[in-house]
Image (spheres, helix red, strand yellow):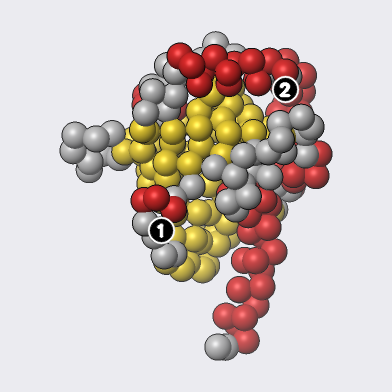
């Protein structure tokens, strides 16, 4: 392995750390220097978002009655705001802060090439100055709550709009894929809540 490749790998691991906090299957458990205004607006918006006790009540309702969340309503760019531990009784302040500092986001696009089953093109990314790390893959909805089941097939490191490093990832079999159990989507306020496969509870705000 060349020195150049080792440096890329080390940088990739460093930048991937906040994403791994979110996506690792003990799961869910913004530092863009040029985007200070966006982060300030995001932090201000947090004050108007639902509190943990409200989300837990909405989750109980969704488990019994379904969430009513549809494919089209999920399309767009969602910025991570807050993360609670899997016991659901306290916020993870370190993870929540990292998500906002590194501008962590989840982007869902319509897959134009798919046939009968609506599939998302899915991108999870974080930023560090001009650098951006992206996990790219696909997802689909299943069930009435529903579950957003997904996988990543590629990871990339970009400098502005230029790809400087990319690697394919092994796609897990269906039963081992991560998922978000969707709880509530408030289209008027622009927020989405879900619980990950590992038990953590997350809240996003639509950009």
Screen quadrant of the C terminus:
top right
Q: Decide if residue 38 is on the left or right side of residue 79.
A: right
User: On screen, 134 above or below 81?
Assistant: below
Q: Residues within 10 Å of mark 2 (few under 14, many from 20)?
A: some
What whole-number distance in Å separates the C-alpha atoms at marks 1 and 2?
Answer: 32 Å
Give me the residue at 59% from left, 44% from top: 198
- Where on the picture, by quarter, is residue 140? top left
**Residue tagged 1:** 172
Residue 103 position by quadrant: top right
Image location of residue 179, percent across then percent down:
48, 41
The image position of residue 176, as x and y in percent, is 44, 53
Q: Residue furthest front?
A: 64
Q: Which mark is residue 52?
A: 2
SS class of the residue under badge 2?
Answer: helix
Work out which residue is located at the far bottom of the displayed protein and give it. 2
Q: Residue at position x 68%, y 38% from top?
A: 86
Nearer-N-terminus badge (1/2):
2
Tag 1 secondary structure: loop
Residue projecting furthest to the left: 115
Number of labels in the image equals 2
């Amino acid at each position: 392995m060349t020195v150049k490749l080792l440096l890329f790998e080390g940088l990739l691991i460093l930048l991937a750390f906040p994403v791994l906090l979110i996506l690792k299957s003990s799961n869910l458990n913004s530092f863009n220097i040029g985007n200070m205004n966006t982060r300030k607006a995001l932090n201000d918006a947090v004050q108007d978002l639902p509190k943990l006790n409200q989300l837990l009540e909405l989750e109980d309702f969704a488990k019994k009655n379904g969430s009513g969340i549809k494919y089209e309503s999920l399309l767009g760019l969602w910025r991570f705001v807050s993360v609670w531990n899997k016991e659901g009784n306290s916020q993870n302040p370190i993870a929540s802060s990292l998500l906002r500092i590194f501008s962590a986001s989840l982007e869902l696009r319509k897959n134009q090439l798919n046939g009968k089953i609506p599939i998302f093109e899915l991108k999870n990314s974080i930023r560090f100055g001009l650098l951006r790390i992206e996990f790219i893959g696909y997802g689909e909805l299943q069930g009435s709550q529903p579950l957003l089941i997904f996988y990543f097939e590629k990871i990339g490191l970009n400098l502005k709009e230029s790809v400087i490093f990319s690697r394919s990832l092994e796609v897990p079999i269906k039963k081992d894929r991560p998922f978000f159990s969707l709880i509530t989507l408030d289209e008027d306020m622009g927020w989405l809540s879900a619980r990950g496969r590992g038990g953590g509870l997350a809240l996003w705000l639509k950009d």
